[in-house]
């Protein structure tokens, strides 16, 4: 098999390996990756590992044929790729959260006409507030988003939540749920056609084991 | 000024000096556009000539439409307008648009300028469409497209001709086995008719297809109540289905409402085979971004191109929007993507001759060579390193006048020869 598969490092990595293994793919080279970013399996696919947010970039450009990526990343980046399968793992939800107690957002809208939102997901946050008839001012932050409302940088945050523990520890409460997310199998538009047989076969094998 | 403030001021100055160093005097281009330099321009022209040559051998005659049109006219081409595009005002305040697509202007041209032609009308074009680049897609704003449109009787014969012409053009351009996939908007609609999908379900399902999300498609189909049993399975799998004619036979059995469309696609496959073109793959997940498509949709793929090298389809209702209903089908090759896919062309060896001392001193000889298509370039006698200059210009020989005759150096291998006159050089 000549396919190149892009696997996200980080939170989805371990379960991605389980899914690949369940689909009958060799994963040994991925177990002791160290600092290597690319490994070729003899008689198997080539794996590349990237940051989760970069997976769609590699797949859309054709540098990888297939990729595993959270729905959150797909909705944020809107890549032109095929979303083939819900792999079932990595379940979490995109939420709008503000400080516990009185929700500061309605007052901010009422008095200033705008709600300030800190998020890594700028496009998702913008679309959500626009679709719910509110004007939002999005502040892009790259990590520890929960900090922003605590120090007055923003009224609240749009972020991905799995258990809600981080929110609670920082005195934040979930106000609105925006969408559910889980890991998806995506394919490059051209690979999906030129490698049709191999892609379809893999999708079938993944589907048998996805929840 | 205290010491700390002046240190701060200095650091600010230092930083701005650094920025100036780094950024220089910037000469930017707008997002998504770029210049084309000589090597690429030559390769793109060669590709364009090849494609238009094949299209013209099928009887397609070139037409050109203006770069700018009235916005409201072009907007008629799409149900909810053409969406994102570069728009501007003319001197009377009317809104203009830079053509974001070529099918709409060509459909307008056929429906207006060629309204009286009984047809079938076969036209080709080689032009650029311009669309604001959208984040992440990696596609530039400017798309050079070479395409054909056939406004005719509306049958499978026309669909097959366009597919065969496309395959022939791609093969001539250097793709040995172009992979063409065809889907059908009409077939998908017929299956949706078969399950009695309501308008909300149709919108959601088409949205899923346009977004290329099989996941969203599958979850939306679960809400279509009439989709049970084999019909339900067919609907759920529809955009994942691909294969050859046998697939269409199977669909026709399960969903009789789609039998006509299946038969038409089968007929198209037979006709394409009769042309000797590679068999297209049936892929019902193939859809186009523009909603004017009404029947077959066509995509062609090549290794090395990250998106389809050619796209098109049938758009029977578009002509009526410009006053002259006429079924039509067309396809366009995106030149930049094809260029990526075909690799470095063969036979683009350096040719021509650099005449030291200036070709103006040998006007007759230079003119004779140029008349036979051999590039002749002059350079001053004092020019240092004419061989290197010849190389950068894609010229093969350097000719230096000697007391009698010429010394000629082939810059590709450094071999020097002597000749009596330019008319008998190795470039003949």
Image (cartoon, rainbow, N blue to C red):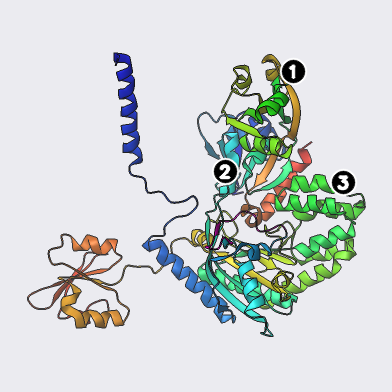
Residue B368, quarter of picture: bottom left
Q: What numbered label is drawn on residue A102?
A: 1
Q: Chain of mark 3?
A: B
User: How many marks overall?
Assistant: 3
Nearer to us in this view, B362 or B398: B362
Q: Magenta span has B85?
A: yes
What residue is pinned by disc 3?
A: B223
Q: Nearer the viewer, mark 2 or mark 3?
A: 3
Image disc number at residue B196: none
Question: Percent from the top left, x then y, of residue B172?
Answer: 52, 72
For label 1, the crowd category at 10 Å Cα-Cα, with few meaning under 14, some 14 to 19 and many 20 or more, is: few
Can residue A207 be seen here?
yes
Q: Which residue is mark 2?
A: A57
User: Which callout, 1 or 2, points at the residue further toward the start of the chain?
Assistant: 2
Which of the two residues, A182 or B99, is positioned nearer the viewer here? B99
Q: Is residue B62 above or below residue B26?
A: below
Numbered disc in front, either 3 or 1: 1
Instruction: Look at the image and give the residue range highlighted in magenta.
Output: B80-94
Whether residue B222 appears in magenta in the rendering, the answer is no
């Amino acid at each position: 098999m000549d396919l190149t598969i892009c696997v996200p490092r980080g939170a989805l990595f371990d379960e991605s390996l389980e899914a690949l293994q369940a689909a009958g793919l060799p994963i040994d080279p991925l177990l002791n990756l160290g600092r290597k970013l690319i490994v070729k399996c003899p008689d198997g696919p080539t794996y590349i590992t990237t940051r989760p947010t970069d997976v769609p970039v590699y797949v859309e450009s054709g540098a990888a044929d297939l990729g595993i990526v959270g729905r959150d990343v797909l909705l944020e980046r809107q890549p032109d790729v095929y979303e083939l399968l819900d792999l079932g793992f990595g379940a979490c939800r995109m939420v709008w959260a503000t400080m516990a107690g009185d929700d500061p957002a309605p007052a901010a809208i009422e008095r200033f006409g705008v709600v300030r939102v800190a998020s890594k997901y700028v496009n998702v946050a913008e679309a959500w507030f626009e679709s719910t008839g509110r004007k939002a001012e999005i502040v892009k932050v790259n990590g520890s988003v929960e900090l922003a409302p605590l120090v007055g940088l923003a009224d609240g945050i749009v972020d991905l939540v799995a258990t809600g523990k981080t929110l609670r520890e920082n005195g934040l409460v979930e106000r609105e749920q925006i969408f559910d997310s889980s890991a998806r199998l995506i394919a490059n538009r051209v690979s999906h056609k030129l490698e049709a047989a191999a892609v379809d076969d893999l999708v079938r094998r993944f589907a048998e084991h996805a929840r | 000024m205290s010491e700390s403030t002046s240190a701060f001021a200095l650091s600010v100055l230092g930083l701005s000096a650094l920025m100036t160093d780094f950024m220089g005097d910037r000469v930017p281009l707008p997002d998504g556009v770029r210049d084309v330099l000589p090597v690429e321009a030559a390769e793109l022209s060669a590709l364009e000539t090849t494609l238009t040559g094949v299209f013209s051998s099928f009887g397609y005659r070139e037409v050109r439409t203006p770069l700018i049109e009235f916005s409201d006219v072009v907007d008629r081409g799409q149900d909810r307008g053409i969406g994102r595009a570069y728009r501007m005002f003319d001197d009377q305040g009317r809104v203009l648009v830079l053509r974001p697509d070529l099918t709409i202007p060509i459909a307008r041209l056929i429906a207006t300028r060629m309204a009286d032609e009984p047809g079938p009308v076969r036209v080709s074009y080689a032009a650029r469409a311009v669309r604001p680049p959208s984040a992440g897609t990696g596609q530039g704003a400017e798309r050079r497209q070479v395409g054909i449109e056939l406004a005719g009787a509306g049958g499978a014969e026309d669909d097959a001709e366009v597919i065969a012409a496309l395959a022939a053009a791609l093969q001539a351009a250097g793709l040995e086995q172009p992979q063409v996939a065809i889907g059908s908007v009409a077939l998908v609609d017929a299956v949706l008719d078969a399950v009695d999908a309501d308008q909300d379900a149709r919108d959601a399902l088409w949205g899923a297809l346009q977004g290329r999300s099989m996941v969203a498609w599958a979850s939306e189909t679960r809400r279509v109540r009439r989709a049970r049993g084999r019909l339900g399975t067919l609907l759920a799998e529809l955009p994942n289905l691909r294969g050859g004619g046998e697939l269409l036979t199977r669909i026709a059995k399960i969903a009789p409402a789609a039998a006509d469309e299946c038969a038409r696609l089968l007929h198209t496959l037979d006709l394409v085979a009769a042309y000797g073109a590679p068999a297209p793959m049936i892929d019902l997940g193939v859809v186009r971004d523009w909603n004017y498509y009404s029947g077959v949709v066509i995509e062609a793929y090549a290794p090395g191109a990250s998106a389809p090298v050619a796209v098109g389809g049938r758009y029977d209702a578009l002509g009526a929007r410009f006053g002259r209903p006429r079924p039509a089908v067309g396809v366009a090759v995106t030149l930049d993507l094809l260029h990526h896919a075909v690799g470095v062309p063969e036979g683009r060896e350096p040719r021509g001759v650099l005449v030291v001392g200036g070709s103006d001193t040998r006007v007759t000889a230079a003119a004779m060579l140029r008349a036979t298509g051999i590039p002749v370039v002059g350079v001053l006698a004092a020019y240092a390193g004419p061989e290197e200059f010849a190389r950068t210009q894609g010229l093969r020989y350097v000719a230096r006048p000697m007391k009698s005759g010429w010394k000629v150096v082939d810059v590709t291998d450094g071999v020097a020869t002597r000749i009596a006159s330019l008319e008998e050089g190795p470039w003949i």
